[in-house]
Structures are given as structure tokens and as C-alpha cells.
Image (cartoon, rainbow, N blue to C red):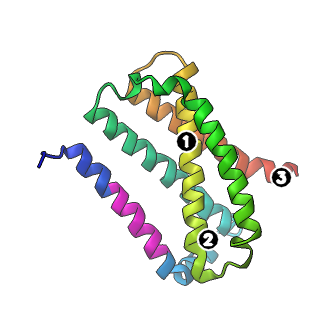
Amino acid sequence: MSHLSKWTGYQVALLCVVIAGLVSKHFYIISIHEWLEGLPSWMNPSIATTFICIIVTVWSTAAVLYWQERKNTQFFTHKIWRVLPAILGGVFVLSLIGFVVLGVTVFASITLDQQWKIDVVLLYFLTLLYLFVLSVVRRYGKVRPSEDLIVYSANCTVLVLLITLFFVPGIL
């Protein structure tokens, strides 16, 4: 049996924390909603929840990739990064079609007990979006150290999602 690095331990621990957070959200949903209702009146509880979800998902994915880079310094020099924007774009389009089909069938009658299904889909799309931004920044951006690349792309993703979250609904 090979010896696992401390970076693998960090990755597994972070994955466990995210899963524990999802499970605890499911069990404590009523308490969470009561707490969110106590927020100042100018802060919409659903936007606050989405904001926290965006930050945690994108930065958790960035942390996992950072630790992967620490384990394998050739991670960002692999040939796959040249074609990854196109691959992830195609996966995103197919996933969006699948989400629409699921929305019409499975998600149309979802109850509060089945909220975890939507959480999993949201995590999937946020992670996919982050990986797409990372691959575009890696492919078309200036050469930069991998740590800077990961942080830069994570921050760009969060910024784009937050601008979309706060400004697009106001325009429509």
C-alpha cells in the first residue's frame, strides 16, 4: 500500500467537510431558515444562502486543485488543458439539457425532503463552471504560477457569479 501524502489527506478532509455540511443542512433546514429570517431586512435570505454556497463550492474546488498541484507539479502542464475549454463547454451544454429534462420531470415535484437533489445539481454546475473558467484562464491567459492561476480563476468565477446573482435579476 502506498503512502498517501498530506495533500491527499487535506483533499479527503475537505470533501468530508462539504458532505457533512450538506447532510447537516438537510437535517437542520428549519433552524437555518429561522436563522436566515433574522438577517437584516435589506438582505434576502435566499440570496445569502446562494452567496455562501457559491463561495464554499468554488473555493473548496480551488483548494482541492491547489493541493493536487502540490502533489503533482506537472498537473497544469498536461496536454488536456489545451482542449479542456472545448470539452467542458460541451459537457456544460449537455448538462444543461439534462437539467432541463430533469427540471420538467424529476425536479417538478420535489419536496423539502428531497432538497439535497437540487443541492447536488447546484454543486455540480458550480464546480463545472469553475473548472471551465480555470481551463480558459489556463489556456488563454498569461503564463503564471499554478497557485496564482487557481486563486485568480476562483476569484474570477466568484465575481462573475455574484455579479450575475445581484445585478441580472434587477435588469430583468
Say left or right for 85 vs 103: left
Range of residues picked out in magenta: 14-25
2 vs 1, front mark: 1
Seen at 17% across and 46% down, the residue is 4
Whole-percent x, y for residue 170 in the image: 83, 52
Label number found at residue 130: 1
Marks 1/3: CA–CA distance: 24 Å
Which of 91 and 41 lies nearest the eye of the viewer? 91
Seen at 54% across and 77% down, the residue is 32
Q: In this figure, what is the number of numbered marks?
A: 3
Q: Residues within 10 Å of mark 2 (few under 14, many from 20)?
A: few
Marks 2/1: CA–CA distance: 29 Å
Q: Main secondary structure of the magenta part?
A: helix
Pointer 2 residue: 39
Query: Answer yes or no: do the residues labelled 1 and 3 have beta carbons within 8 Å?
Result: no
- Say which quarter of the image contains residue 109: bottom right
Which of 111 and 17 lies nearest the eye of the viewer? 111
Q: Amino acid at mark 3?
A: Gly
1 vs 3, front mark: 1
Which of 96 and 19 lies nearest the eye of the viewer? 96
Vertical placement of residue 22 versus 30, above or below:
above
Of helix, strand and loop, which one carries label 3? Answer: helix
Vertical placement of residue 161 versus 56, above or below:
above
Q: Amino acid at mark 1?
A: Tyr
Sequence-first disc among 2 and 1: 2
Of helix, strand and loop, which one carries label 2? Answer: loop
Sequence-first disc among 1 and 3: 1
Label number found at residue 170: 3
Seen at 28% across and 34% down, the residue is 70
